[in-house]
Amino acid sequence: MRGLERRDVMLLVIVAVMTLFAPIILNPFPANSAMAQFNAGYPDLMQRFVIFGIFAIGFNILFGLTGYLSFGHAAFLGVGSYSAVWMFKLLGFNIIPAILLSVVVAGLFSVVIGYISLRRSGIYFSILTLAFAQMSFALAYSVLGNPALINLTNGETGLQVYPSDPQVLHGASAPNVTNLFGLEMRQTCEVKLGGTASGLSGCDTHMLPGAFGETFWAFDFNAGYYVCAVLMLIVFYLSIRIFRSPFGMMLRAVKSNQQRLNYTGLNPRPYTLAAFVISGMYAGLAGGLMASMDPLAGAERMQWTASGEVVLMTILGGAGTLIGPVLGAGFIKYFENIFSKINDGVLHSWFAFMPEGLENLFVTLLHPFVGKGWHLTLGILFMLVVIFLPGGLVEGGQRIGRFAFRRRNRKGGEAEAEAARKQPAE
Amino acid sequence: MSTSRFTRRGVLRTGAIASAGLALPTYLRAEAHTGFTNAPGDSEVVLGFNVPQTGPYADEGADELRAFELAVEHLNGEGDGGMLNTFSEKNLDGTGILGRRVNFVTGDTQTKSDAARASARSMIEKDGAIMISGGSSSGVAVAVQGLCQEAGVIFMAGLTHSNDTTGKDRKANGFRHFFNAYMSAAALAPVLQNLYGTDRNAYHLTADYNWGWTQQESIAAATEAMGWETVNNVLTPLAETDFSAYIAPVLSSGADVLVLNHYGGNMVNSLTNAVQFGLREAQANGKKFEIVVPLYSELMARGAGQNIKGIPGSQNWDWKLENEMGERYVGTNAFVQSFGEKYGFPPSQAAHTCYVQTLLYADAVTRAGSFNPCAVVEALEGFEFDGMGNGPTLYRAGDHQCFKDVVVVRGKENPENEFDLVEIVEVTPTEQVTYEPDHPMFDGGDLGECNPGA
Amino acid sequence: MDAVILQFLNGLDKGSAYALIALGLTLIFGTLGVVNFAHGALFMIGAFCAVTMSRLLSLSHQVVDETRTDFLGNPMKVDVPYVNDWFGEATGALIIDWAVPISILLAIPVMLLVGIVMERGLIKHFYKRPHADQILVTFGLAIVLQEIIKQVYGANPIPTPAPEAFRGSLDFGVMLGFDPYTITYPYWRLVYFAFSVIIIGAVFAFLQFTTFGMVVRAGMADRETVGLLGIDIDRRFTLMFGLAAIVAGLAGVMYTPINSPNYHMGMDFLVLSFVVVVVGGMGSLPGAVAAGFLLGILQSFASMNWIKDIIPGIDQIIIYLVAILILLTRPRGLLGRKGVMEE
């Protein structure tokens, strides 16, 4: 492909295949088995995987390449969401203007914040970005949502579309939900594989009824997900290009030794600012997509914990690697959505085959770690990953790979290792 | 995974076919012949209970979850049946809903609109939930209610007190049993008049977000109507933990009543701070200084400890209601009995509203003879019932708000045990707290059409 | 005028809490070079030492009282604290009343232990790792600690009142010749202020006037050289970590009567304390203290009504606004050194 080395093409193809078949890959367990709890292939979560993937890929362009640790990127995501919902309110439910505006507004916002914050480096930079983001959050939550003053954000409740909104471009026949020229974002086709009873029609299909007895698999193919997925592949391709470009090399130079860069007569500020704005636009895109999938924008999206989350995603996956941030995003969102839903009833149903005493023992042992204890599990896993896998999940993958293919030549499929190696030590 | 190779191949083929047919319209998991989202099968029906399990309201969420579990037990004919025995409708016989066993899934709202919607969507999209209930704040309730309206499932709100939930953000698929800020104000005002007279100057501290504003507006309007003056209204940041800077100027402001429009941790902290600053011992304008907290829950009272003593507030329900106020509130003891037997302590008002909402939904489905959300909406609109602990209650068709008596309470001076935190001062009858659906504080809302999904 | 004095006083009090928390944070950073996101959790653990102590002191056995009934109509079980049995009812009640100050005795050994275990068990392995890794691992630890506390004590705030003698407030206004009730301030907050000043002074004196402190200061300036002189600097740094944990823990213990402690109080303070430390200048102890007081006072003034009327919402953003202004005019905060945390 244009401008890419072979191993990058490999990586892109692998990611593309994984993304396009995610509805199948993420639903490996039969829908009527106890393990279905762990299936993640439903539209909302799949959309979140790719949207936060985009957010983290963008963040990685700044943090992974230049080493500037921003603690305020959630502000751009929030601003993107608000712009998108405003487009829905003013123009109509087509997502194109919404996404365009969200990227543009987030870009402008990041130019301002970046220009000021990049005057400092290290933790001083981090605190400046944090301060800007917290200010945006506080204002969006209260002052800017107060009908008595100026209601830009609708405060705590979140900005949403009301029937009384103008929606000037909204045609009479256009669907009353977010859509791409009529293709509704929430439109989902379900495919059932195996099983017996069938009530499916339209684009929903039923494959091989009875082939597996009662057991069946269900796969959701959601329009919104594929819109997000295609955009993610595009921005992923862009990020590979940036990583491999002279511009990317310049950013790495900023990370490894800014002073030396200064001595060669180069001013690093324009480069870092460009990286900051690009990553801000990625965040804006993610925010716009979030609003497009679900037209509500809440202020919590801008809180420091949300900014912290993308930092965690990136470092957990492997900062400075191409695929790492996407993995980290998936990891955290999986926990948030799957583990938090495991309650005692579910635990009991898993261990129902055991004698009662043993069943209760297992449920009691697992109880603190699932359901309302999902934070605990996540915290422990963070610590384990950081302690034992400093390069994040990507390093874990490499170690497994090295272990499995120890005797094979270190070629092919090692684009990641290469990317990681190119990172100068801090 | 010995069959994985075969399966995957089949699956890939399936995927290819499916993507070819992507452009054909369907809605979520709606199945064409039923005409609505997540139509249950013949053996079981799934309800989604979406409560805060992490974050500051986690304990309240845990109590809601207990109530939901109890309701499901009773619907499925386990346990002692609780309020099924006292409910004025006798359609529920312990065989589930319409002969289907009730199953439930739980999720964590984290008290954030985004997380709550994500969790609700996963219940609808993944688990096939036909009704979503729960929640412990108005922001979340409004967000999830909007989602349920779009997705075509019923939303039975949990604890949400803002006027907006059934005011400007009302939705046809959403129902609220809990009372609201307007009702609090209407119920409190006469009691405040009795306690503190008509010549008072009130100083409001208000949490700076939607719920705080609506409550402050309601309380100010109701107290001004009986002659009080509002000296000042100061908005406080939600994230604030130390309210000293806001409490300190109160005494020198000329006010003699402090109204705390705060909820949860905010309220616990601001009340604790106010008591520290000696407001309760102070004199102003020749009168004893007083503090009012228009809405507080049992858990907040427990968090505030000693400081809650004597503080008036309003509640949707209290577990002592039937014992102290008589037969009218039948159902209360039946619920307290089965809840207390199971968990060892009395239920909170959040637990009560969630339990009642679940039963009301089940009953509406049974009366309608269908799980179709539009049929359920029709069954609930204008529905009058009794025996659920609040006395005779109406689910008004115009805005899907329940109208019933409001309990006015005070923090108890000498609690007999750790659950006995408040004493009932008065029960304000329904008529006094009723308003028109287009009352200015609720105006601008539009229920819209009920949405069955498909 | 009285309002300004009042907010100034309140700012000093707020500031002393900020300064105390920031002090421990910057102590760890200055000595060990570690960015400790679990510092808020240490503060929280300190607060829960007070909760534990008051629970321990009011540990009771149940006596069935046939004359009264519980909410289900069964005979009521009345709790009788053991201290009442041992010391008689009056002394017993007094001991329970003084639970918060008494829990300092519990908090010191507990926090020292927690600090040393944390440093030896986890932080030690992260000295050579990038700051981002330190942030991540200590953040993970903070989540784990707060979730454990939540599982044990629940999410609801737990009231831990000050001793009876310190409830209520002092009327300053009368002393200064104003009308009664114009400037009043709670006794316990005054106690907290005095306590903070003493602790801050003690830490400074310890570093300034003891040999141990001198070595630690030398180690902060040049760790390797001190090591070459044959001094076991690692052990001293471990103790410094323990000391910082004690400072955070005591701040937590004394804070409990001001606000009922809950499991996320540490996170609530975390961002704020980082802002304080950075505004003061990374690794600078006097800087942290100065910044704590500065931000506390400014925040108090920003919440005054007439200022809020001019700029709505200023009280929500003042801290961040000041942080931005200071960092733009003084690149390394108020008293920061060049080259620290700038790479």
Image (cartoon, coloured by chain):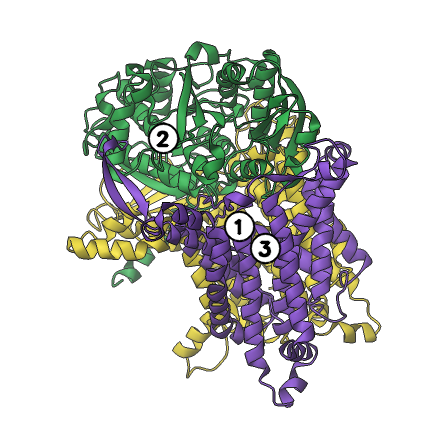
Residue lying furthest left in this view?
A355
Instruction: Tell me the element at label 2.
Output: helix
Q: Which chain is purple?
A: C
Per the image, the residue denoted by label 2 is B354
- In the figure, residue B196 lies in which quadrant? top right
Mark closer to the chain start, 1 or 3: 1
Residue lying furthest top in this view?
B431
Q: Which percent across, then down, holds residue B307?
A: 49, 36
- Choose between C42 and A209: the one closer to the eye: C42
**Marks 1/2: CA–CA distance:** 29 Å
- In the figure, residue B53 lies in which quadrant? top left
Chain B colour?
Answer: green
Q: Which percent across, then down, holds residue B300?
A: 46, 36
Residue located 19% across and 24% down the image:
B93
Residues at marks 2 and 3 touching, judged by CB atoms closer than 8 Å: no
**Marks 2/3: CA–CA distance:** 35 Å
Residue B17 appearing in the image = yes
Q: What number is the disc on residue C270?
A: 3
- In the figure, residue C311 lies in which quadrant? top right
Q: The yellow chain is which one?
A: A
The answer to whether B412 is drawn above or below residue C248 in the figure is above
